[in-house]
Amino acid sequence: MRGVLGVFHELDSLVDAVAALKKERSGDITVYSATPRHEIEHVMAHGPSVVRRFTLIGGLLGATFGYWIAIWASDYWPLVVGGKPIAAWVPYTIFGFEMMVLIGSLATVAGLFINARVPRLTMTVGYDPRFSDGAFGVWVACPPDKERAVAATLERNGAVEVRSER
Amino acid sequence: MAAVTEPVRAPRRSNIPSANVQLPAVQSYTQVNDEIIATLRGTKAWFVGLGLAITALAIGIAAWMYQIYFGLGVAGYAPPVMWGVYIITFVFWVGIGHAGTLISAILYLFRAGFRTTIYRCAEAMTVFAVMTAGLFPILHLGRPWKFFWLIPYPNWRLLWPQFKSPLVWDVFAILTYLTVSTTFLYIGLLPDLAALRDRETHPVRKQIFSLLSMGWRNSDREWRHFARAYLFLAAFSTPLVLSVHSVVSFDFAMALTPGWHATIFPPYFVAGAIFSGIGMVFTIIIPIRRWFNLKHYVTINHLDAAAKLCLTTSLIVGLAYVTEFWVAWYSGNKVEQDYFINRVFGQWWWAAWIMLLCNMVLPLSLFSQRLRRNTTWLFILSLFINLGMWFERFVIVVPSLSHEFEPWQWTQYAPSWVDWAILLGSFGWFSMWFLLFIKQFPVIAIAEVKEIIPPPVRRPHPHEDAIDTSARHLAFETETPGEHD
């Protein structure tokens, strides 16, 4: 992976730089900030996160499993009590609900990890420890012939430090 | 004609809106990192606290080993009172956990700003409280090493748990709650672990934080999916927190025992759990903000808002107490009526009156804004709430079992030294984990605090007017008696 990394001290400078880079179609852009900011979300203009699909599927599977295990076990080892159902849906809703929450939550975390690409084994390229402190950053993955133009755009919009990395 | 003038009055002090949750004394992202990460340095007081916690835990473990060797008879059970301190303490600790999830998840969904600086402590409290609670049903077993029989798994005995038993409902509810709470805490910690990793200079600690933060880089891709995942986890945790204590209440409400068999139990238990948890949050957060110099993060406004929540849940709990008496009277059931008369005038009258005083009467003081903003009073009150809520569970468990339908069932109950030692051990276990947590991980969510302070900008921020930087609440704090004692 090869590209240019810009470090910013102000949020609006960063947003201006990203807008300019997008206009120039410079390459894949990654923005770093110590906290989520709507300004960055708007300028990056990504669609809604697909984590919700993981949540939905996990929740449905969990609810199904919760009801199934209780009904199956009751049917496998029936305790016959006069006037009482072998499989009672009211108490079994507790298992359906708890399993929906459990599997749905774990599926949500799986969705986060898969889509955010964590765990990440290496992080030396295109990152600076200042991004978890007070600085903002932009990483533009681009071929060598575009690096000069990208660096110029970053500097023009207020980057305090620009460097090429690979 | 003489002009009529209004008499001059001294200006009244205005009511400070606790919804004002800005942090005027916090100016930059770097300051947030510096000040919150500085709390991780070990101190003598912390080591002393940890030593005391481990000592209390050791006493509890010794008592448990004694109980395993000699049998459950040493625990002070007197038939038919076969649920005693262990089940009381189980319900107590599960309840403590609830406020953590309320603050971290429910208030997140409601966008209540005052949660930001207190939720990490509350969430950690939840995880360790549920870990503590989970021990008690096991301690209560005659053969605790067979506890896994409650978990449904394919086995050579071809045995499955009884899915219609409230005790099995408990297993599912508590294990789900523990797993989801731990997951929620850990996911929220990821960005802060990355901040710790990037600051750390010690190679071993840096390696540990690198592993724990999973290579988190604060990229826009990570934040986009993180925000959505965190929202869904909060959305799952919200009904979960309501369900868990409802399920715990079913342990009682499904039985035909006087005082237990009531439909009011689930909401009554949930309100009581949140009330007791908020009490424990005050017990924990007030010393932390003082010892760690975090008064400008956990401001008086935050405590004021949390105190209002405490007052509200206290009123709900009080209503539930009164409703229980009304239901007993209105039912016309002689046994139920006798039980409730016995509750307040019988052999356990003192426990009932401790409960009523601590949970209904003393929290009424929070109608006073001056007392809501007095940290000394809040801390003292929180101790009374913890005491009162333990006795609430005592009043639910012991008088009911010792005063059932037939006079031959009426008996005495006195906890033994083993009960008290294990209760002490549970506080040691909880405190040990909590103290270890606050020196390894940030007690305030670094990334979330950064969200509520103005970002550094070249041009004025378009919403700058909406941010109150007047420090009005700080000016008020100094006037509050007890705040700087």
Image (cartoon, coloured by chain):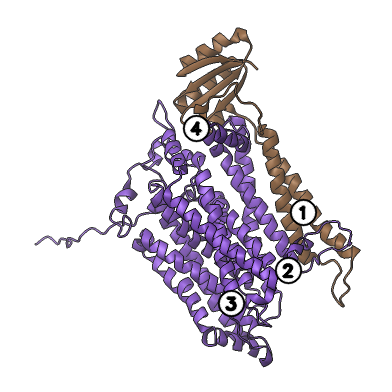
Chain colours: A brown, B purple
Q: Which mark is residue B297?
A: none
- Describe residue B235's horizontal placement relative to residue A96 as left or right: left
Residue type at mark 4: give it.
Arg
Closer to the N terminus: mark 4 or mark 2? 2
- Secondary structure, mark 2, is helix
Question: Which residue sits at x=52%, y=13%?
Answer: A151
Query: Which residue is disc 4 drawn over?
Result: B199
Circle 4 crowding by C-alpha within 10 Å: few under 14, some 14–19, many from 20: some
- Answer whether labels 1 and 3 touch (C-beta < 8 Å): no
User: Within 10 Å of the Cα at label 1, are there few (<14), some (14-19), or many (20+) other Cα atoms?
Assistant: many
Image vertical order of residue B183 relative to residue B384, above or below: above
Mark 3 vs mark 4, foreground winner is 3
Q: Which label is found at residue B166? A: 2
Q: CA distance from mark 2 to mark 3?
A: 25 Å
The quadrant of the image that shows the N terminus of chain A is top right
Mark 1 element type: helix
As shown in the figure, which amino acid type bears the numbered disc 3? Pro
